[in-house]
Image (spheres, grey):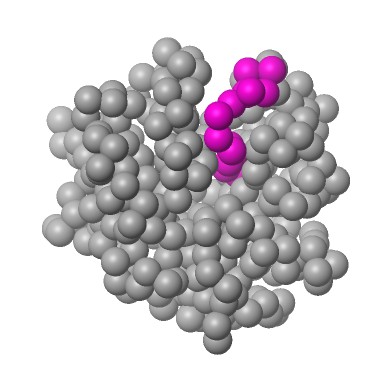
Amino acid sequence: MSPSDSAPLCQAPSIELRSPLTKFPAGAVDCHAHVCGPATQFPYAQERIYTPPDATLENYQALLKMLGINRAVLVQPSVYGTDNRAMLAALKSNPHQFRGVAVISSDPKEVSDQELSDLHAAGVRGLRCNIVDIADKSAGLPIEQLRNLAKRIQPFGWHLELLMHVNEHPDLAKTFEDFPVDLVFGHFGYAHAKHGVVDKGFQGLLDLMKHQHAWVKMTGPYRICDGDLPYVDMRPFNDAVIEANPNRLIWGSDWPHVMVKKQMPHDADLYDLLGEWVQDESLRNAILVNNPCILYDFPAFKS
């Protein structure tokens, strides 16, 4: 079976040159983006469920310049599995501008402590566990594997980033109440807006935030609601996470917006939406600058 049959090609991100109306503060961090390709240099895993068009480091740096963002966190996409070479090459290109979130095997025999140390030296500050974009979804939440990974990364001060649908886990708060490291949940917890903020899993996420156990990425609102901009169904989720703990929030573009099956968002519009939803400038600065510096170990910004 060819890759196009088993892993369909995604639509490409917008190439329209347009800056946001709301200006980013100095030292702002895009906390969620992916580098994909060039596929000729960094081939995708055979086991992937989608095929992104090339979205290279050069493409992304041009986007950062257009938007006015100084720094970024590059998250290992599922199409590369545990092959972190593309992400690490990007980190190496500018260690002061980038931090990384890697994916490694859960088998401790496959990744040594020295390899973890090397990842840390390269700028990696967390591991990602994707429990959504996988071919076999029958296994459920691999809590013991997650706990074992957490124990290994604890000495480095890293976090564990989870891409999971929190609405599928009504006991989320109890499951992770004594977890060894901080947790980061992508896309507001990735619960579709139709479940509402009263959903038990989402309420569990809020509880973890209140008790300083979890962070939330304010990313991908277009992924978890039915409409297009301004994604009105997502506003209650935005307000709920702010009320839970504004010091545990970070924002990201989610560029290059892989697997979007609706109107492709423009990154300037996504940031302007944050400006509309978070009008308090000091709170916006915390989400864009202060909080990311704590979570990802960025140094003080020098313009």
Q: Which residue lies at the image location 50% right of the left edge and 18% below the top edge?
A: 143
Q: Which residue lies at the image location 40% right of the left edge and 32% below the top edge?
A: 152
- Residue 189 visible within the image: yes
Q: Please, is residue 190 above or below residue 76 in the view?
A: above
Q: Please, is residue 40 above or below residue 300 in the view?
A: above
Residue nearest the observer in this picture, 278 or 129 = 129
* x, y percent for residue 288: 65, 65
Q: Please, is residue 183 above or below residue 247 in the view?
A: above
Magenta residues span 174-187
Q: Which residue lies at the image location 33% right of the left edge and 57% below the top edge?
A: 121
Q: Quadrant of the N terminus?
A: top left
Q: Please, is residue 24 above or below residue 126 in the view?
A: below
Q: Is residue 153 left or right of residue 105?
A: right
* x, y percent for residue 209: 73, 38
Q: Quadrant of the C terminus?
A: bottom right
Residue nearest the observer in this picture, 14 or 279 = 279
